[in-house]
Amino acid sequence: MNLNNKYFLLAFVFSQILILQSSLAQDALEQGRALTFTKSKGNCLACHIVENGELPGNSGPPLIQMALRFPDRSILRNQIWDASVVNPNTVMPPFGKHNILTEDEIELVVDYLLSL
Amino acid sequence: MKIFPLSFSMLILALVISGQVYASTGANTGANSGAETDTGENPEQDRQALRAYYENLFPGVPADAHKDGIYAIDAPSRAQWQEMEEFPLYEIAVDEGEELFYTPFDTGVTYADCFENEGAVKQLYPHFDEHTSSVVTLEMAINTCRATNKTTALEYGSAELNNLSSYIAFVSRNQKVQVAEPKTAAALAAYKAGKRFYSTRRGHLNFACTSCHIQLAGRKLRAEKLSASLGHVTHFPVYRFKWQEMLSLHQRFAECNSQVGALPFDLQGVEYRNLEYFLSYLSNGMQLNGPATRK
Amino acid sequence: MKKPGIFLPTIVALLLVSGCNDSGQVKDNTPPQALSEPALQTPATDKRTTSEIIANAKTLHLQARQLGHAWSTTQDHITEAEKLLAAKDMVSAQVSALRAELSASASIAQSHSEQNAWQDRFPK
């Protein structure tokens, strides 16, 4: 087998993995979006403007340019887990501390927000 | 392979941060129970401070204008509301209440004998009763009237009771809220309990009444603008459009509690009565304008 | 002929494959009520029966209620756990029971942290 073929095979496997990866990622993003928008779940729209979210409230800042503004993922996650750590007077519900979203659901929301 | 660079960098990013993701589980800060410091309540100072707070928050809106609730600060929905008020949906309740008001009990006595001034008495409620050391509301007084006439009590929140209180609210229109300033230790304790209830976060959503109606007043949750505390007591009972029925103030308290995920308290129980007492004192001097229509 | 860096791409590929599997599993096979909740991480090692967990959740819930801080979500999880238990769905029943317990504890914690915090929320 010549080396080029090997590389070709490798590249092929590679691309398959990436395609699979990206469709899984799309699924996860869609789940994250649903959690962010749904009233009985994150209901982040109650307070935040989020891209493509209808009738958002204005009780919190718009959730825009998240990846840029939250290079440290854990800061974003902690804000959602319990916003009162940073601001004791916050009105943002402590989604993790009060078991409103599960840990996995919070990760999905974080993924989604970072894609914005 | 168009997706290559994007996915590749995503992967690298994911690899880099995956270590941090599960590492940072927030910790539940422990209970900080401490001796409760008695700050000494000053109801009149609270009332002035609250009025100043809203006048500052809503320039051009006089504090007394909040008797119209959200419609004091939400011009677009105010027009809609005024249209609704032209053919008031609470009229049936008022009419039925009037009929009940003048229907004699077996003793031959009517509510008109219990409530002076043909029922224009809403401004006298709630009040703190020193003998029983508790807050007396209009709804309780209606049931007391029944009891003295050997008639069974009405269920709180029932249509019959809400109709009666709607009628009394209607004939009391234009009177002003005039809750006597709490002076005795017991009255101040009830006032303080109401204030504490109003300011305490509850439910898994972790909201206090103050979160929405003081901190976020004028802001929106979804499309709903949040109203000021001032005037919350002036316009009840309300015809709730959403439910197509009359709703008492305590039923609204229960709805708010439920909305934040807290188990509601008993209608006319001590918690809600103290809360009503506290809120009513704050609305002192404001015009009674119930019943009203609300979305 | 030299074999320039065939190993490097292979290793990168392996890394990617493992990374891919990892995130794929977490994101995709998670039951709606995730078991990776910190307190729920090892439900199997919880020595108590689900009935015992439910009973404890009820005790805590009642305590929260007496403190004026009961949550409706606790109630919902308890009801759910009992329903699942009756249907012999043991794994889900245990998850719901543990979530009920978690909510009840958090509601009691809320009553403690609100003990004094309420005093700062009214205009002065």
Image (tube, rainbow, N blue to C red):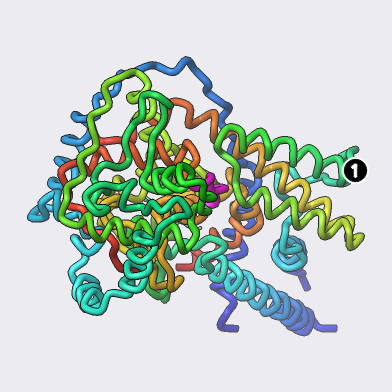
Indicate whether B25 appears above or below B81. Answer: above
Where, quadrant-wise, is the C terminus of chain A in this rendering? bottom left
Observer-nearest of B107 and C34: B107
Quadrant of the frame with the N terminus of chain A = bottom right
Where residue B5 appears, as percent x and y from the top left, is: 55, 73
Horizontal placement of B151 versus B213: left or right? right
What residue range appears in magenta? B260-267
Q: Quadrant of residue A8?
A: bottom right
User: Is residue B262 in the magenta section?
Assistant: yes
Residue found at x 54% / y 58%: A110
User: Which of the pair B83/A81 is nearer the observer?
Assistant: B83
> Is B201 on the left or on the right of C43, as rendered?
left
Is residue B169 visible in the rendered image? The answer is: yes
At mark 1, the secondary structure is: loop
Q: Which residue is mark 1?
A: C49
Q: Magenta region's main secondary structure?
A: loop
> What residue lies at 62% left-to-right and 49% top-to-bottom?
A99
Which quadrant of the figure has residue B272?
Answer: top left
User: What is the three-letter code of the residue carrying label 1?
Assistant: Thr
Answer above or below: position of C28 versus B83.
above
Mark 1 burial class by Cα count in 10 Å: few <14, some 14-19, many 20+: few
Q: Is residue B73 left or right of residue A97?
A: left
